[in-house]
Every structure is written in structure tokens, then in C-alpha cells.
Amino acid sequence: MIIVTRTVKVDTNAPAEEGFVAIYNITPKVQQHLVESYVANGILTVFLPGTTAAIGTIEYEAGLLSDFKNMWSRIVPRDLVYTHKFLWEENNACSHVRASLMGASLVVPLVNKRLILGQYQQIILVEFDNRTRNRQVVLQFMGEKGTAEY
């Protein structure tokens, strides 16, 4: 068994006009790291350090992206009174709540140097914070050793 760890860098911005929800398709970057690794078959853990963004999957198309953004405004509104604001003098408590609901990690099977995702399924980073961030997504490929391809 081999373990290969890589990072994907994503500079984010959660625009106010979209409810502080910005969605980034990181699938191509993740697939490229897999191809360049020595792991052929196994699993990938995608992990996002931080408490105001999340990792997940979605069908990455305009209508669903809009629906997804609107859903967050309904279930975790920005304009509620959150205790976090009084403790830290920050106005991003809804970002923390949204990220904790969605989660910081994802596991994807790997077969023959391919991510096993559904036909329309993409790996996404969702930024909920109210300011620009430089995110470092950790990829950990674990499994049988194959050959690296470039």
C-alpha cells in the first residue's frame, strides 16, 4: 500500500450578492493529482482545513448551483443574531454553521487511476465566509501502487 498526499490551492471569494456562497469545481485539479501520483486503485480522502468552507459533490450546472446557493439562505440565514458575533466581533457565524452542516471531508473510490464519481457528479469546495480566502485542500490518495503518468 502507498499513501500520497497533495494539496490543491483555491483562492476564494464569497460574494455578498450571492448570499456568501461561492462554489468551486475542483474535480479537474484532483484528477490531475491522481494521474501524477503512484496510486492506481484505492481511496481518496479530500479534506479542507478550516471552519468557514466545506467539501462535497454536486451536479455542477447553473440551475442547480443557483438552487444550492438559495437553499443555504433559507436554512442558515445570514441576518440572524449569532452569539459568535459578540464573542469574536466577526459577522461570519452563519459561515461556520453552514460549513459544519456540509462537512470538511469526502471519500472517493479510485479505480485504474480514475475517480469513481457519478456521470454528472463533481467535487466542489464551497466558500461560505464573507471575505477572500486562500484555501489549501488536502488530498490523500491511499491504495495499490501503480505507475505515475504525466
Image: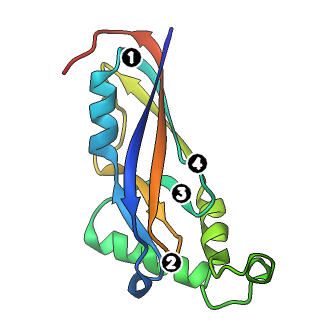
Mark 3 — residue?
54
- Vertical comparison of 144 with 141: above or below: above
Q: Position of residue 92 (x, y in %)?
A: 62, 77
| Display coloring | rainbow
Q: CA distance from mark 4 to mark 3?
A: 9 Å
Per the image, label 3 sits on a secondary structure element best described as: strand
Q: Which mark sits nearer the N-terminus, 4 or 1?
A: 1
Q: Residue at x 38, y 17 (%)?
A: 39
Q: CA distance from mark 4 to mark 1?
A: 23 Å
**Image position, residue 30 (x, y; %):** 34, 38
Query: Which residue position is annotated with label 2?
Result: 71
Which SS class for mark 4? loop
- Seen in the picture, residue 61 relative to 136 is either above or below; the reply is below
Q: Give the CA distance from mark 1 to mark 2.
A: 37 Å
Q: Nearer the viewer, residue 24 or 61?
A: 24
**Which one is earlier in the sequence, the residue at label 3 or at label 2?**
3
